[in-house]
Image: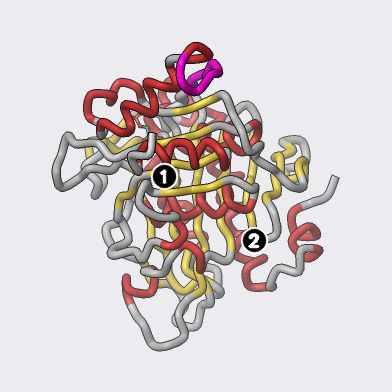
Amino acid sequence: MQRLIPTLRQDQVAEGLISVINTLQICAKEISFRLHQGELAGVLGSTLDENIQGETQKKLDVLSNQLLKDILLENKFVRAVASEEEEGIVDGFSDGKYLIAFDPLDGSSNIDINSMVGTIFSILPAPTDGTEDEAMFLQPGSNQVAAGYVLYGPSTLLVFTTGKGVRVFTLDQKVGEFLLTEHDLEIPKDTCEFAINMSNYRHWQPEMRHYIDDLLAGETGPRCKNFNMRWIAAMVADVHRVLCRGGLFTYPWDCREANKPYKLRLMYEGNPMAMLVEQAGGQAHSGEQRILDIQPQHIHQRIGVILGSSNEVDACLSYLQGSQ
Ligand code: F6P
């Protein structure tokens, strides 16, 4: 089985980008090791703090963030990093070629129940026109040169794209190396599976409720087929299932807080997942536009997400646009 670096060379990935992806996999192995040690490493549970999004921080959120930040910022190709756990960007090398946005530990409320979590990353080119600070990151997702995630589950997987399909590497714990186990993931166009947090039903737009009602109506309803539902409550794991066997994943607009109608973040959740999903032949939409076309306004921007099997994303959008 092929190792990571030879696969990247075969895909003719630029040396600087190979170096950044290599650094990310080093961090991933370290985080994976701590996670698998669980209680033995004394890293489970919460800190007394909240992150800048107002969410309780897990000890492992803090540790993973610190690890990624420290190790990435030693790489001379890294211009700056942006993290879910940091209010502003953190500068690296002034002549670095890449910007890395990451969610160090997505789905971290799953840690304490020994369920799946992951690290999501998005790599953008650093602007060469003198743009500085946070403005460097405010590029549409279509500019990403690579995107991916590490899924810490029964096996640790590194799933990423550099724009030439979606590769899956599995961490071989015996040799401590990521080995290529899937060359080109492809999402089936049709699906009978969806993922949504149903407990928010009463907060959705009527059009989204109508779409879900019709899925639940099954084969005697207007969709004429039975649908199954799955919700792992870690985007990284739910999207991984969609990449492996198709499905529709959505975290839609919700009316609870007028100034915070969305949960998921564009720069380190929506964009990297959208690039992966499109590379695997699926679609990723905010409900208003293709996610990869969104011009970000700030690094912690939130958006609606509807992604997965192409025909099902179209079906969902047709309800939202009122044509059903
Ligand atoms: O980043 C937020 C996140 O943990 C996602 O990974 C996941 O899809 C979602 O929130 C889970 O939301 P909820 O708590 O509503 O199930």
Q: Quadrant of residue 162?
A: bottom right
> What amino acid is at disc 1?
Leu
Give how far across and how far down residue 60 sits, in percent: 41, 38
User: Which structural element holds mark 2?
Assistant: loop
Q: Nearer the viewer, residue 144 or 322?
A: 322
- The region drawn magenta spans 221-230
Residue 297 in sight in this render: yes
Q: Is residue 201 left or right of residue 68?
A: left
Residue 6 forms part of the magenta stretch: no
Horizontally, is 115 left or right of 153 in the view?
left
The quarter of the rendered structure image containing the N terminus is: top right
Q: Quadrant of residue 101?
A: bottom left
Please give the residue where the numbered disc 2 appears in the rendered image: 162
Q: Nearer the viewer, residue 118 or 238?
A: 238
Give above or below for 241 relative to 217: below
Measured in 3D between alpha carbons, the distance from the residue under mark 2 to the one under mark 1, in whole angstroms, is 27 Å
Q: Position of residue 57 (x, y in %)?
A: 30, 38
Mark 1 secondary-structure assignment: helix
Amino acid at circle 2: Thr
In the image as oriented, which residue stretches furthest toward the top?
A: 220
**Residue extending farthest bottom:** 129
Q: Residue furthest left?
A: 258
For the C terminus, give its image quadrant: top left
Residue 199: x %, y % from top left: 30, 21
Q: Is residue 102 visible?
A: no
**At 45% across and 22% down in the image, what residue appears?**
215
Q: Which residue is mark 1?
A: 63
Is the residue 161 above or below the residue 214 in the image? below
Mark 2 or 1, nearer chain start? 1
